[in-house]
Image: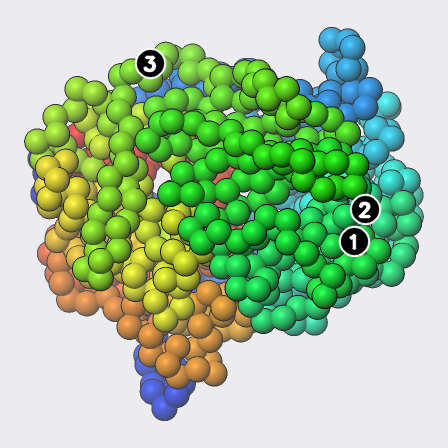
Amino acid sequence: MAKRMPALLTPPTAETRPHPITLHGQTRDDPYAWLRDDNWQEVMREPGALAPDIRTYLDAENAYCKAVMAPTQKLQDALFAEMKGRIREDDSTVPAPDGRFKYFMKYRTGGQHPIFCRKHKNGNKEEILLDGDIQAGDSSYFNIGDCDHSPDHKLIAFSVDDKGSEYFTIALRDTQTGDDLSDLLPGTTGHVAWGSDSRSLFYTTLDDNHRPNKVFLHIVGTPDDKDMLVYEEKDPGFFVGVDKSESGRFILISAHDHETSEVWCIPAHAPQSTPKLIAPRTPGLQYEITDIAETFFILTNADEAEDFAIMTAPINAPERNHWASFIVHRPGCLILSQLAFHHFHVRLERFGGLPRIVVTRLNDQGGAIENHTIAFEEEAFSLSLIPGYEFETDMMRFSYSSPTTPQQVFDYNMKTKKRTLRKTQEVPSGHDPDDYVTRRIMARTEDGADVPVTLLYHRITKLDGTAPVLLYGYGAYGHTIPAGFSTTRLSLVDRGFIYAIAHIRGSKALGYGWYRKGKRDQKINSFTDFIAAGNTLVKQGFTSRGHIVAHGGSAGGMLMGAVANMAPELFRGIIADVPFVDVLNTMCDKTLPLTPPEWPEWGNPITDKNAFEYIKSYSPYDNVSAQSYPHILATAGLTDPRVTYWEPAKWVAKLRATKVGDSLVLLKTNMEAGHAGAAGRFDHLKEIALTTAFALMVNDKG
């Protein structure tokens, strides 16, 4: 071990209890299954209901982690101070116009939570609509899910989760008096959509297994037990959501899993209307809609458009047989999203691994007049569209950043093509982009794929193989890690680390096919891609074997567990945030929140023996073996509905009992939070400081 590593302490030992599981003619023993509390649904709502023996074990793991990391406390304090110093504490967003007001969010110096505000369009007097710090009080956990004003600006609907379990309660407030109405809507996803009358409110509820399955219509001032059920999803594999189109004319209800979707629409001016189906769900057909003039614009993979196309249909005849081509499918050019304006259609797409924005000017009937592209020239960067409130406008807003360039927010006049910088992310403690280098390299895999890897390092870092690397990866659900700016990464980079992101298969970095080749019966490609990225960094002289810390969270935590089993000698350390590591058991438990909706992603091992065998072949928990492992830090959230706390707890217990050698295996469970960890912005930085200190400690860089 490195000289700065702490002296070995005695770690907790989890009791083993026989727990045979038989499926497909095979019997497995899961001796740590007792860490899954039978009343986990109750624990999500009331953490105090956790079984005493489980709490005792998790508390012991927390105490052990704290003791092992105690020598780094001064380092953690310094890291926290650095990270906090890079945040403008009284920061605010660029105001978004809507009618006679401009809405924005800000923070106060020392404040943990956002404050939602507005000003009159032609004035500077500020109105505070919702003060997150005051609302939070002394809550140990507090998170605002949504804060949305009614079309007449007289009310706001806001949602709060005070457990970390993502059960949000929606409340209403009068913007003129500041008084809360008696309306309370518990057990929701937290998102709302207002009807045009400013008295109708659509929202989605969660069932007992934490799945969003019902959409309700609430009329302001009435009890929630009188709310009208608008839509109920009977298939536990489909999640439901509700939103409003950019024009404000339609309430949109979506039902989807990871491969199939369908959309229902309701006129926002007639909220009690029967929902109208756009196109019935067809296995593998994905689509989403927006509207301009008398036309629906449909982003879809219909007609084998793997990287998606945009089609149109008349609003009065939106059925599948009326869909016509608007933007044709171009293989390798993935259309990510669309935004609608009165005379413009905007799309965000990715080509060659880099994003770009394309603006199409329309005539009064919604037909295309011309296209133009907004692009940038750095080797790697991030672009995102920022939806606004106004539809009849020529102004569109987007953000840009790169690993070296702080976020910039632009207003863009789609008619004149003039770009106006509205805000640049401020780093109060100072940041010179010229001090850093961003690069994009390619890692060749054994099967011939080229994996993009984004690098960030200080310009004085020696590229002679001696630098340590933090290699980040995710690679699931098609989610692509953006090559954007992060102030917290600088604490590693300024200490000589190279920060790398491996854009592995399972993401959509190189199109939808890149995602398809990293899911279900090709999932192992995600793991071998990540290992190839690490090996390439060694071969090209950036680092050396055993000096890489791998980092990933959630499904990226599965990646961490898999590569720890497959190539432990490549890594010095592994940081696995809320890791999805007990894959086989979770995918065999259809009562868990995400299991049925995730079968299209991983396969259904209950009904499909081949899926069972394949998942079993890589599931990190099931493949822990008697070998040397890197130093490992795993985190968990007690009320996490996405990756339940017992997954990392079981994994850590099995690792410690099975591995050989004296590497550290640590578990830190947040007993007052869920999947995202602490909600307060500074409390969250303390969690990042802990994982950063771990990476520095194991590489003797503290």
The N terminus - image quarter: top left
374 sits to left or right of 339: left
What's the residue type where badge 3 is placed? Asp
Q: Secondary structure at mark 1?
A: strand
Q: Secondary structure at mark 3?
A: loop
Q: Nearer the viewer, residue 219 or 519?
A: 519
Q: Which residue is mark 3?
A: 432
What's the residue type where badge 2 is placed? Glu
Q: Residue furthest front?
A: 369
How many marks can you see? Answer: 3
Q: Nearer the viewer, residue 497 or 518?
A: 518
Q: Nearer the viewer, residue 455 or 71?
A: 455
Which is more N-terminal, label 1 or label 2?
2
Q: Secondary structure at mark 2?
A: loop
For residue 4, say whether it is visible.
Answer: no
Q: Residue at x 18, y 60 (%)?
A: 446
> Do the numbered discs 2 and 1 sit on residues whose CB atoms are within 8 Å?
yes
Q: Which residue is mark 2?
A: 294
Q: Which residue is mark 1?
A: 314
Q: Position of residue 581 (x, y in %)?
A: 36, 61
Q: Residue at x 61, y 42 (%)?
A: 338
Front of the two marks 3 and 2: 2
Q: Residue furthest bottom?
A: 25
Q: Position of residue 328 (x, y in %)?
A: 56, 52
For residue 677, say whether it is visible.
Answer: yes
372 sits to left or right of 6: right
Q: Which mark is residue 271?
A: none
Q: Nearer the viewer, residue 43 or 322?
A: 322
Front of the two marks 1 and 3: 1
What's the residue type where badge 1 is placed? Pro
